[in-house]
Image (spheres, rainbow, N blue to C red):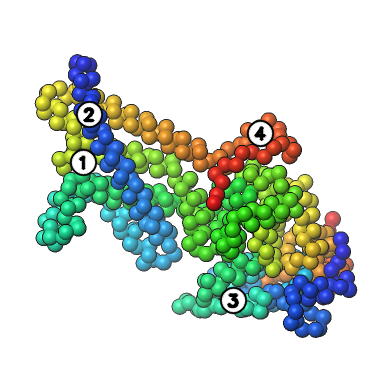
Amino acid sequence: MSNALLSPDHPATGSLRSGAGLPADDAAPAVLTVENIHKRFAALEVLRGISLTARTGDVIAVLGSSGSGKSTFLRCLNFLETPSAGRIWVHGEEVRTRRDRAGALRPADSRQLTRLRARVGMVFQQFNLWPHMSVLDNLIEAPRRVRGLPKRECVEKAEALLEKVGLAERRDYYPAHLSGGQQQRAAIARTLAMDPEVILFDEPTSALDPELVGEVLGVIGALAEEGRTMLIVTHEIGFARDVSTRALFLDEGRVEEDGPPDILFTNPDSDRLRRFLARHLH
Amino acid sequence: MNIQVSLDVLPELLKGAWLTLQLLFISGFFGVLLAVPLAIARTSSLVLVRALPFAYIFFFRGTPLLVQLFLVYYGLSQFQVIQDSPILWPILREPYWCAIITFALHTAAYIAEILRGAIQAVPPGEIEAARALGMGRATTMGRIVLPRAARLALPAYGNELILMLKGSALASTITLLDLTGMARTVIARNYMPVETFLAAGLIYMTITFVLVRGLRWVEHRTSAHTRARPADVAGAGPGLPAPPRRGARD
């Protein structure tokens, strides 16, 4: 699989996709920026200050042992988990927050949050398809209810997306009648139906039988090749190395290492990453 | 024991059964309408919003239906304000509407508790998925949580409906000629309580039977997504034709 970071046309692709009026330097526009995110559950400090800028076309693999805070970090990005401190921008628009009486951070403007969430897709470990709706209805629900698009348009788009993830034949099935891999591909299509500017993958293959992992990774890999901006929390080291343009290694709630995957995976600086790779790379 | 008497009283009892069904379904309809906001408020994260439905449910589950019926029928008419009201009085002076109002308020408390449990049983991940896709609270509630909860609540709701069918016999205490009231009127004339109540009991059982079958049908209709696809049992491959569209949404 091609590595977008190393391909010379990558920043240009980024600019093209985002239209005119961009800075002429080599940096693609920032889709998602987080600054100094902290998250504390009671006495447990899960995230201890994480900053990150995801630019158009970035495929950022987020690695770390269990308990390192990577899933919490991802969930903080669209406020499914409210960070204890820190700031988040989606395409330059800051998510407005306030402090409640107990001093905890809260979203200040639920309309704004809802609007911004619609631009940040999320794929869950447990798929979380709505079981009472057919696959097609799962896909058209958000575009219709959130975007208010006409049904026919939504159905056409959903069918194209199902074709893309190889589920065209399954459009009228209920989620319970699909395999785990098919459910996750449907969930990815459901996210794509909202045309997200960045997609967050929260361990998308961890709940799957080993023989079903490949089909889901194949779909995610194809999205990476399209130049979509993605953050992927995963334990699939080999996959992360193949598709990512950048890798983060989280440890004890901090970014322990951050760099191009080729360097990070072959020549890690820290002992912790070296040990992590030794555990996961065979 | 004279079976012929039981048969002879049937036409009159069936008239009473018709009133029983009216009481059951009209109060049931308003009960569900009232229960939905109660249940939603009951699951609120704000203590004050939770407190109101809690007090309501506590009162209506904590006192006998008969007491509630008397409070509405005899109690409210004590107030001059209500007797003077051109809107309330025409309704509250009718035992028919007093019964329907009481039954609706009563059953709403139970349905709200059933629905609260069902709302809380909707897997959080499905709600998160809706929120992550940009659905607001109201959309998530209306499109994801309530439809899911309604299916989860259905079996318990069937039980509540049957309890209300039998509870509606109390309407006979405020002069209404429902199935029980009609039976008592007939008995005052024919002095045949065993034959008459036996016939009334059989009618109640028949109604229950039909309700149970009806609810089972609704459960079946709304649970296609949890049943195995017949084609899968037969080992269907991906090449088979898609199943018929069921429950298409628009």
Q: Are marks 3 and 4 on the same chain?
A: no
User: Cα distance, mark 1 to mark 4?
Assistant: 51 Å
Kind of residue at badge 2: Leu
Report which quarter residue B154 is drawn in: top left
**Residue A125: mark:** none
Q: Nearer the viewer, residue A83 or B195?
A: B195
**Of tags 2 and 1, which is closer to the observer?**
2
- Chain of the residue under label 1: B
Query: Circle 2 is placed at which residue position?
Result: B13
Marks 3/4: CA distance?
48 Å
Instruction: List the residue tagged with mark 1.
Output: B171
Q: Position of residue A178 (x, y in %)?
A: 67, 44
Gap between marks 2 and 4 measured at Cα: 49 Å
User: How far across and down, in percent of the image, does residue B114 sit?
Assistant: 40, 48
Give the camera-side residue of A165 and B120.
Answer: A165
Q: Secondary structure at mark 2?
A: helix
Same-chain status of marks 3 and 2: no
Q: In which quadrant will I find the N terminus of chain A?
A: bottom right
Q: Mark 4 — residue?
A: B231
The chain to which mark 4 is attached is B
Residue, disc 3: A95
- Which of discs 3 and 2 lies nearer the camera? The answer is 2
Q: In the rendered structure, which disc, 2 or 4, sits on the residue that comes first in sequence?
A: 2
Question: Disc 2 or 1, which lies upstream in sequence?
Answer: 2
Q: Amino acid at mark 1?
A: Ala
The answer to whether mark 3 and mark 2 are in CB contact below 8 A is no
